[in-house]
Image (cartoon, helix red, strand yellow):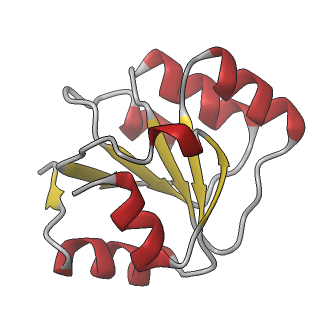
Amino acid sequence: MTLKEIVDKLGATVPLGAEKLGMEVEHAFASDLMSDVLTLKDTPVLVTGLCNVQTIRTCDMANLDVVIFVRNKKPTEDMIELAEDNDMVLICTAYSMFKTCGILYQAGMKPLY
């Protein structure tokens, strides 16, 4: 599935990385616990409601390239700058984490576990 398809299905906005919407992704992981994110072995899309600079730092440490913020959370300018420095894509949707994961799963996105 492409990031463009994800954005369309979630009615999402892309504060950073719109030029990468053609990128293909297969797996997603949903969590608000950054300690769980640090245990990831692959590089899935992260779905989270935790919207702060630490989220971006954690994703950088875990080599995650795509973050979907749920519940209408918006990244700050500091977050966008840090994510840009780390070549990330940031996506924002108004949907809850549960609904976001359901839409992605139904569209063919595979869970990491």
In the picture, residue 53 is in which quadrant?
Answer: top right
Q: Is residue 78 left or right of residue 55?
A: right
Q: Is residue 32 left or right of residue 44?
A: right
Question: Where's residue 99, x and y in %?
Answer: 41, 84
Question: Where's residue 104, x and y in %?
Answer: 28, 71
Say which residue appears at 50% left-offset and 29% top-offset: 59
Question: Where's residue 39, x and y in %?
Answer: 29, 29
In the picture, residue 66 is in which quadrant?
Answer: top left
**Residue placed most toward the observer, 53 or 15:** 15
Say which residue appears at 39% left-offset and 20% top-offset: 63
Q: Is residue 11 left or right of residue 82?
A: left
Q: How many marks?
A: 0
Q: Quadrant of the N terminus?
A: bottom left
Q: Is residue 65 left or right of residue 50?
A: left
**Residue placed most toward the observer, 69 or 87:** 87
Q: Is residue 87 above or below residue 17?
A: above
Say which residue appears at 31% left-offset and 80% top-offset: 103
Question: Where's residue 60, x and y in %?
Answer: 51, 20
**Extreme residue in the right direction:** 77
Q: Is residue 53 above or below residue 95?
A: above
Say which residue appears at 63% left-offset and 53% top-offset: 50
